[in-house]
Each structure stands twice: as structure tokens, then as C-alpha cells.
Image (cartoon, rainbow, N blue to C red):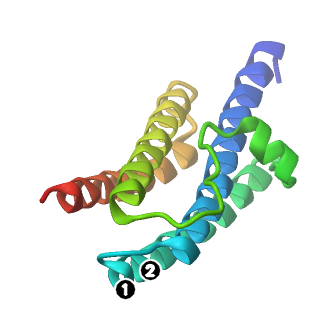
């Protein structure tokens, strides 16, 4: 493998590891909100947040295994995740629905942007496995963002 090709592949792995970091911090944040949600729509949000963090946990596993299948190591420590995530962890305090909707929506936008970046780079490199995997995430996050935006109305 040429040096330039290896550098490009390693940049793609770096981006996948950053996505993995975002997913890990997001999963913990969602679980924190699940434990700390209060007020109107408690029951609905409590269930939805659990659904979200369970789904994010599955995505974490899928991305880590994708990195492994490419012959590289996924991040595995909280230090790595915190240093490489654009998503900020939540404070351990009670939180209401509007703050949750706003924060989770922003975080899904962050995930969506990272996925778009990964897909674009994968397409340039003819890495169709990664590109195809990102398609699923793009559809998933677009739907979640639409639903969150609808939930913030009224």
C-alpha cells in the first residue's frame, strides 16, 4: 500500500473513531436524561430516551466492529471518547422536556454531520462498505431530527 493511500485510510479510521466517540458520549448523555427527566411528558420521554440509547449502543458496536473488520483498533477508553467527541456530556441534574428536545436535536445534527463527512470521504476512496453503512445512519438521523423538531412545536 502506498504511503498516500495509507494516510487516507487512516484519516477515514480517525473519522470513524471520532464518530464512535460521539456515539459513546451520546449514549451516556441519553441515559443521564432518561434518569433525570421530569415534568410534562415524563412517561413518553423516559421511554423514548431509553429507546434512543439502546439504539445508539447497537450503533456503537456496529461502528467498532466495522473499524476492526478494516484491520484497525476502535477507541475503547472514556479518555479517548471524551477527547475525540464533539458532543458534550450532560450535567447530572433534573432536566425538562424542552431542554432535552433541544439538546438531543443538536446532538443528532452533530452525528448527522459527522456521518455525511465519513460518507463523502468513503465515496472518494471507493470504500463502499463504509459509504453504504453511513446511508443507514443518514436516514435514521434525518427521521429522528424531523420527529424531534415536530415535538418541539407547541
- Residue 135 horizontal side relative to residue 5, left or right: left
Element assignment for label 1: helix
Q: Is residue 129 visible?
A: yes
Task: Provide residue 76's location: percent of width, then percent of height.
Answer: 85, 55
- Tell me the tag on residue 46: 2
In percent of the image, x 57 and y 76: which residue is there?
35
Quadrant location of the N terminus?
Answer: top right
Neighbour tally class for label 1: few under 14, some 14-19, many 20 plus, Cα within 10 Å: few
Residue 71 appears left or right of 118: right
Label pair 1/2, CB-CB below 8 angstroms: yes
Q: What residue appears at the point 45 percent right and 35 percent down from the top-left corner?
A: 113
Instruction: Tell which of 87 and 15 is nearer to you.
Output: 87
Instruction: Name the residue beneath numbered marker 1.
Output: 43
- The image quarter in which residue 17 lies: top right
User: Is residue 73 in view?
Assistant: no
In percent of width and height, residue 81 lies at 77, 47
Q: Quarter-wise, where is residue 106 in the image?
A: top left
Tell me: residue 70, above or below residue 37.
above
- Rendered location of residue 112, percent (x, y): 43, 43
Toward the left, the furthest residue is: 154
Query: Compared to 63, does 46 lie above or below?
Result: below
Q: Residue at x 62, y 69 (%)?
A: 57
Q: In which quadrant will I find the C terminus?
A: bottom left
The Cα atoms of the two marked residues, 1 and 2, are separated by 5 Å
Amino acid at each position: 500500500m502506498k504511503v498516500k493511500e495509507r494516510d487516507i485510510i487512516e484519516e477515514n479510521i480517525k473519522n470513524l473513531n471520532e464518530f464512535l466517540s460521539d456515539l459513546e458520549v451520546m449514549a451516556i448523555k441519553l441515559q443521564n436524561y432518561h434518569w433525570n427527566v421530569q415534568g410534562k411528558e415524563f412517561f413518553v420521554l423516559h421511554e423514548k430516551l431509553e429507546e434512543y440509547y439502546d439504539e445508539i449502543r447497537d450503533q456503537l458496536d456496529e461502528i467498532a466492529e466495522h473499524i476492526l473488520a478494516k484491520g484497525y483498533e476502535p477507541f475503547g477508553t472514556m479518555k479517548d471518547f471524551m477527547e475525540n467527541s464533539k458532543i458534550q456530556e450532560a450535567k447530572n441534574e433534573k432536566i425538562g422536556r424542552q431542554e432535552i428536545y433541544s439538546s438531543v436535536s443538536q446532538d443528532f445534527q452533530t452525528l448527522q454531520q459527522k456521518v455525511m463527512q465519513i460518507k463523502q470521504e468513503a465515496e472518494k476512496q471507493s470504500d463502499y462498505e463504509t459509504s453504504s453503512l453511513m446511508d443507514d445512519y443518514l436516514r435514521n438521523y434525518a427521521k429522528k431530527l424531523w420527529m424531534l423538531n415536530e415535538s418541539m412545536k407547541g
